[in-house]
Amino acid sequence: MNKDREILVALAGNPNSGKTSLFNKLVGANQKVGNWSGVTVEKYEGATSHKGFKIKVIDLPGTYSLTTYSPEEVVARNFLVDEKPDVVVNVIDATNLERNLYLTTQLIDIQANLIVALNMYDEVEDQKIIIDHNQLERLFGAHMIPTSTTKNSGIQSVLDHIVDLYTGAIDVKRNKLNFSAHLEYYIEKMVEIFLTDKELSAKYLPRWLAIKLLVNDKAVYDLVRDRSVWTNVNKVLSEAVYKTGNEFNTDTELMLKEERHAFIRGAIKETVRRSNNRKKSTTDLIDSILINRITGLPIFALFMWLIFQLTFSLGEAPMLWIESAFNHLSIYMSSVLPDGMTKSIIVDGIIAGVGGVVVFLPNIMILFLALAFLEGTGYMARAAFVIDKVMHKFGLHGKSFIPMITGFGCSVPAFMATRTLKNESDRITTLLIIPFMSCGAKFPVYVLIAGTFFEQSMAGNVLFGIYLFGVIIALISAKLLKSTFFKGESEPFVMELPPYRMPSVKTLLFQMWHKAAIYLRKAGTIILFAAVLIWFASNFPRSVDIEKYYEDQRLMLELNSEYDNNKRNELKEKLRVKELAEQIEYSIVGRLGHLIEPLVSPLGLDWRLGISLVTGIAAKEIVVSTMGTIYSLGDIDENSAALRERLLANPDYNQAVALSFMVFVLLYIPCFAASIVFHREAGKWKWTFFYIFYTVAVAWLMSFIVYRISLFLLM
Amino acid sequence: MKTAADLRFGERGIIHSIDQLHPSARRIIEYGFTPGQVIILAHQTLFSDPLAFIIRGTTIAIRRSEAKSILVE
Ligand SMILES: Nc1nc2c(ncn2[C@@H]2O[C@H](COP(=O)(O)OP(=O)(O)OP(=O)(O)O)[C@@H](O)[C@H]2O)c(=O)[nH]1
Ligand SMILES: [Mg+2]
């Protein structure tokens, strides 16, 4: 396709104005749509074609203005200023023009080819607000198009306008926003000077540079201060600052901002009619209960408890189905495959390994569905509001809560969710404590161990205790980190509580499926690979001596006429298990386990548990499957009941060991995939090393303490 | 002078000025807390911190320490 038939379009707008929704309507690609302010931190691309043009659309992160206060703003602004998209579609929540138009005034400053989508027009009509968009269009000099992504209206018109604007069939007036004579005087003067720098003024609009200098914009200051024109510009700027302080008793930044707000207020007075009897909105009503002073916190706790309950109780039945399906599969496969290596790899390696992972799919899906629902409705922001004080006590931000709770599902999205935290120290602290929020993959370990070593009635409490322990360690760590590494500054808590909206079922299911797919992909790749690898490592090398010894034993058994057939088979089985155990000990896995045994024996763990921890670094799901492999290699009806019996049969294991092991699994380094994401999010090797060291050190120390205390109490 | 943190639940006030020396002043202004603006204390948590104000048609939550930098009349 011809290059100049491709139109680059950027969607810009406040958080929650519906950019992503419009993006999806325009390009037909479905992706994350959330109600949490600032969900989209990266830029998303998509493409569509219209009237023979290829339209490439970029969904920019939501921002309230084009300063460079937060990473989102930097991303949005750099794209708009540096890439200069052909057309900018400013998506606006039309029920709240006063706030949304602030960004519009800044888009006018950069002289963007502007189209304004008056989005959520369905709500405008519901609330009987009347907007004179023709007049608004005249005032702002940009095309205003009513749209509703939920009602699917105005989308075609947006596409038409994009093409027409690009081809020149229609025009933008490019009004400039006029400030007071006082400010304009200095802006003009600076513009004149900037124009003498051909290179700079070709790249950046002189007027924009001048305005940005007046609002103390650090990034623009860095752009211009090395230019030769700077001395002259600086002279004008200093005068402006001085005169503004002297004559108006304020500063240029505040003055500019106020004039923007005043312009918008004027425009709205002229163009918007609201019906007078404005009732309390539904959002206010809901909020009067959900974030009520008295009921807010209990309701919050209830929601969190509900998520847990739903995840684990609703997930139980489908879990059993999946489990039995894999059992049938493994029985079937072992009946059709000839005995030998291939059969062992497939049944004990692959089916057992992958099956152990897929079993948790229902839990993962329910958890993410619940989180997506809370996020989509807008409750997540309230949760941050309600819990901020508590979080703040530990040096955290209310927003840290969301990544932390997501960490209960999986550390990968949790690490990514820390991007909503603008402040570096808040973000790194939150990143570092997320591993202590027990992720879904660790759950099977607890189920197996707690279910084996504790009575049915106790197991649930142990499970809850483990989760709680993780949270406590996380909070203490936060406090510790905040009072050592990250002393001082914390991000201000300034956050919009967006109106409640019912997320569409499609969006929710999409998000759930998206997360489930990531999980399944992990099962199909890393875990499959690791399962095969572990199978090999626990089967090789083989000792010929051991093999021979047991061969002789078996032969002697056959020849021994004292036993009847039953007794003989029983003894044969005993020999087989003993041989397996000895062979594993001889294998790579066994050797590695013995190598690290001195490190884990103070925690009451033997080499088998030690090796499970090592393989668990690849993924926590592998911990259980490793134990399965070590304990019941070659066993065709491998299931957790069999594994439980084997574990109980080991005289070295007891409740203290069980607790110690679970605590270690809870606290030590998350899976390999998560660690990669951590590194990407933290951005510095320094933090990645610290993260590995810190999680392992804390895990070791806590396991040690828990083991010693419970030895003392339980034994 | 009274600050936004002194407003009673449901009470409205008009912003007189923002303490320019407060570290979050710029951020607060960015969210629309400017002189002359009407604000209503709409929600508060059990700990009376943070506080949520209705301003320019949206609900914005800020911490008590930040609300103290907003002078109202
Ligand atoms: N009633 C109504 N709701 C809408 C409309 N467009 C979007 N929404 C809802 O508004 C919420 C926010 O939409 P998003 O598309 O995620 O907004 P965004 O601008 O991408 O938000 P950020 O990425 O957080 O900046 C979602 O709950 C949408 O379902 C609309 O035209 N009408
Ligand atoms: Mg978005």
Image (cartoon, coloured by chain):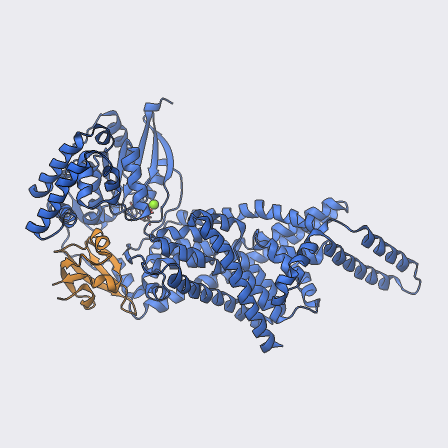
Chain colours: A blue, B orange
Q: Depth check: give the residue in front, A615 or A293.
A: A615
Name which residue lies at 41% across and 53% down: A372
Judge whether residue A148 can be spotted in this image: yes
Q: Is residue A6 above or below residue A107?
A: above
Q: Depth check: give the residue in front, A163 or A277.
A: A163
Measured as percent of width and height from the top left, residue A696 is found at 53, 59
Q: Write down the quadrant of residue A137 in the picture.
A: top left
Q: Write down the quadrant of residue A445 in the picture.
A: bottom right
Name which residue lies at 47% across and 67% down: A468
Measured as percent of width and height from the top left, residue A43 is found at 36, 41
Q: Is residue A350 left or right of residue B24?
A: right
Q: Depth check: give the residue in front, A73 or A30.
A: A73
Judge whether residue A151 can be spotted in this image: no
Q: Write down the quadrant of residue A270 in the picture.
A: top left
Quadrant housing the N terminus of chain A: top left
Q: Is residue A76 above or below residue A276?
A: above
Quadrant housing the C terminus of chain A: bottom right
Q: Depth check: give the residue in front, A471 or A189.
A: A189
Name which residue lies at 31% across and 33% down: A83
Q: Is residue A41 left or right of residue A104?
A: right
Name which residue lies at 82% across and 53% down: A545
Measured as percent of width and height from the top left, residue A360 is found at 55, 55
